[in-house]
Image: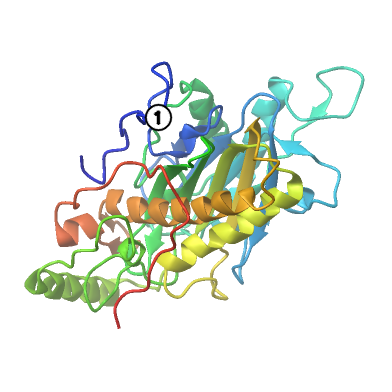
Amino acid sequence: MTRQDTTPPTSPADPPSAPRRRDALTDVAGIRVGHAQVAGAGALSGTTVVLAPEGGAVAAVDVRGGGPGTRETDALDPRNLVQRIDAVVLTGGSAYGLDAASGVMAWLEEQGRGVRVGADPSQVVPVVPAACVFDLGRGGDWRARPNASTGLAAVEDAARTEPGAAVEEGCVGAGTGAVAGQLKGGVGTASVLLPSGISVAALAVVNAAGSVLDPRTGVLYGEYGAAEPAVAPAPEIHQEAQRRLAQARDANTRPPLNTTLAVVATDADLGRAQAQKLAGTAHDGLARAIRPVHLMSDGDTVFALATGARTLDPANPLALNDLLAGGAEAVTRAIVKAVRAATSVNARAGGGTYLAYGDLYGTPRPSAQSPERTGRGADSPPA
């Protein structure tokens, strides 16, 4: 099985009737993911929607980048009224692309999903938190960016999927025009099954100012300290890759702007304050895989969703710790998978040239299946 394979077998600990685990956000029962891309010549952007189960999910957010673009994140403050939300939108297009959330709101209203504000069940106001990455002009057309119709297409795509479906990774949805340092970025997803049977999973849109690649070795930072020892590419391959990256950087008309986004989901029954903690510690996963991170030109944002299907051990006041560690681990692995799944882009009309890790370094190395434990942190690379 390779790292690009998103369909690891069902865990031996699962009953025979358990759904196949995908090493994806959809391993959290009831969570669905949909993507849509902006159409047309010169377009290189899109939207990804994470759709919660019927009845919504407890939600929280932690914003650590210095240049965020968000919508409805204040509603997730544990001190405020809204208790559960039905969808999260991750989108390209910088602040313009936040309009994609309007299309998701319209779809949810048609389904009667949202905060009830009247006696009639149809009288709802869907609360749809959203965050954006900067990808303007990367396909050559500055105005080719997501709007309400893109958001609608993405949520409809999510709604069509079967429970537990595989999630497409790479240059799709909000990751269509993503760039990680000088490498092509994209969408990645991963999950962890805790010994308690609780699942925690992440989906990341990798569009970072910092680098995901150790320039000394050619190893992805997120693979240091992983279950499998990091194996550096041959020196001649790494040297040629660095030459090509430098050539592409010099040819690009402007430096890439930034933001890495993530959604961390669990089937645990978390309160809003606990979900807030999960969103915060999940940023550790960004810091392991991207260096540096949380810069002034980044808008790094992590959302947390808890569906409440499983109860944390009430006799163990530290039961949340395993979940927090698992969330950070899932984010790190999702970032690695996003970079490995990406494909190179040579955009028209001055959009830029962005080379993918796989095209530079060759076939991805074999990958372990979705981890069924947690608690270990990623080690630092050798000095």
Q: Quadrant of the C terminus?
A: bottom left
Residue at image location 49% in from the left, 21% down from the top: 160
Q: Indicate the quadrant where residue 288 lies.
A: bottom left
Is 278 in front, or is 83? 278
Circle 1 sits on which residue? 13
Is 379 in front, or is 250? 379
Residue at image location 14% in from the left, 66% down from the top: 233
Image coordinates for residue 71, horizontal then vertical, percent: 69, 51
Image coordinates for residue 149, horizontal then vertical, percent: 56, 34
Q: Indicate the quadrant where residue 268 lies.
A: top right
Whether residue 277 sits left or right of residue 251 in the image: it is right
Element under disc 1:
loop
**Residue 258 visible in the picture:** no
Colour scheme = rainbow
Residue at image location 26% in from the left, 56% down from the top: 228
Is 50 in front, or is 14? 14
Image coordinates for residue 244, horizontal then vertical, percent: 18, 71
Whether residue 233 sits left or right of residue 282 in the image: it is left
